[in-house]
Amino acid sequence: MLNLITETTDGDPAKESLSQSKVEEKRIYQCAHIDIKSGGGVETYVASLLNSQIPDISHHLNTSLKNVDQKQALLLHLHTPELLWELTGECPAVFTVHNHSCYCPSGTKYLTDHGVCDRVMNPIGCTVGHLVNGCGSRRPQQIIYNIQRGYRHLEALTKFPVTIIANSDYVRSQLIANGLPPEKIITLRCGVQISKTVSHPLTLETHQNRRILFAGRIVPDKGIEWLIKALVKTDPQVHLDIAGKGWARPQVEKLANQLGLANRITWHGWCSGEKLEALYHQCFAVVFPSLWPEPAGLVTLEAYSHYRPVIASAVGGIPEHVQHGKTGILVPPNDTKKLADAINELSKNYQASRNIGEQGYAWFLKEFTIDVHIQRLQKIYENKIAEFQKNRV
């Protein structure tokens, strides 16, 4: 019997599991060792696929392949690398690389004291990264475990005949730099749901409120301290809304108070979807100041879906999702003056802010909705199934 759980049950116990008699053969299965209800980025994405209208797709999540008769599956789509070792090769499979864990033992590609890590994975360099540069745990046993896990993931991607989907060209380049053949990797950028509430272009009234929004975890590598320091150099009327929680909030709040910004920042903590929607609607721009190389950067797409321009750091996969001067403004990471200049530029120019937001929304509809993403993913499925069947003849 397939080990299946539902993405959502809506309180109906009948939906909690599938009996053996109901298991259908020749289906496309989403496979991930995750808790679909936890609400993270991967979880939200997989839930979107489970609820999609892709032909022959199962609307249930496989958390293990050990009890699956893989000969009866039409295709397996894996989202966590540990499951690669459970493949038997009896059906076609694709694997989406959602983060850096397959080629970076710490999973960050970020050195606390040096910025973005430009090393390929190797035991010496990664040990130095952990011990000296602060990219991960400094405990010897954890360092060894992290490096072994990274190599095991990379070995699995090399060994098994899966088509690898990277969520940005940046991630694809990292996989290639770490030895994977380019022809095995396809870039398929992310997509997000269109806002459930009606969004409108930026109004003059909203722009005059001079509010910007940061949405994300409050941790150093998200660039929140950089943003706080830049806020000092912006027009005093600019107000920052912070939506999110994280362990660094006390020290960031202390910094803001020391800089005299207490009355220019509102800390909203974790926000429900409805609350976050309201914050998007009341800002004139969204700031995405990550210092670590985000694999993709979904915040940019969320901003576009609300007609809002993006001010973002030019690291990782973010530049692939921001057209500088057209859908947003890219700034070098940790450059306080340029970040402040970008905020001031949009805060003083309503028409530019509105135009950039409209262009971002148009690009979003063309390239980044979940429906567009699923259409492209379906083509990858079809090609992989056809390739598998051809090779079996």
Image (cartoon, grey):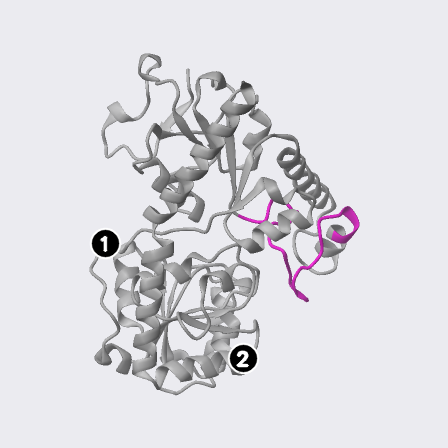
What residue is at 57 percent from the left and 74 percent from the top? 334
Say which amino acid is labelled 2: Thr
In which quadrant of the rendered image does the C terminus lie?
Answer: top right
Say which amino acid is labelled 1: Lys
What residue is at 34 percent from the left and 42 percent from the top? 48
What residue is at 36 percent from the left and 62 percent from the top? 363
Report x, y in % for residue 269: 37, 61
Q: Residues within 10 Å of mark 2 (few under 14, many from 20)?
A: some
Report x, y in % for residue 90: 53, 20
Chief secondary structure of the magenta portion: loop
In which quadrant of the rendered image does the N terminus lie?
Answer: top left
> In terms of secondary structure, where does tag 1 sit?
loop
> In terms of secondary structure, where does tag 2 sit?
helix
- Disc 2: which residue: 336
| Magenta run includes residue 288 | no
Q: Mark 1, mark 2: which one is toward the viewer? A: 1
Boundaries of the magenta span = 99-125
Task: Give the distance between the C-alpha atoms of the residues marked 1 and 2, in whole angstroms.
Answer: 35 Å
Disc 1 and disc 2 in contact, CB within 8 angstroms:
no
- Disc 1: which residue: 196
The image quarter containing residue 205 is bottom left
Point out the tag, 1 or 2, that comes first from the N-terminus. 1
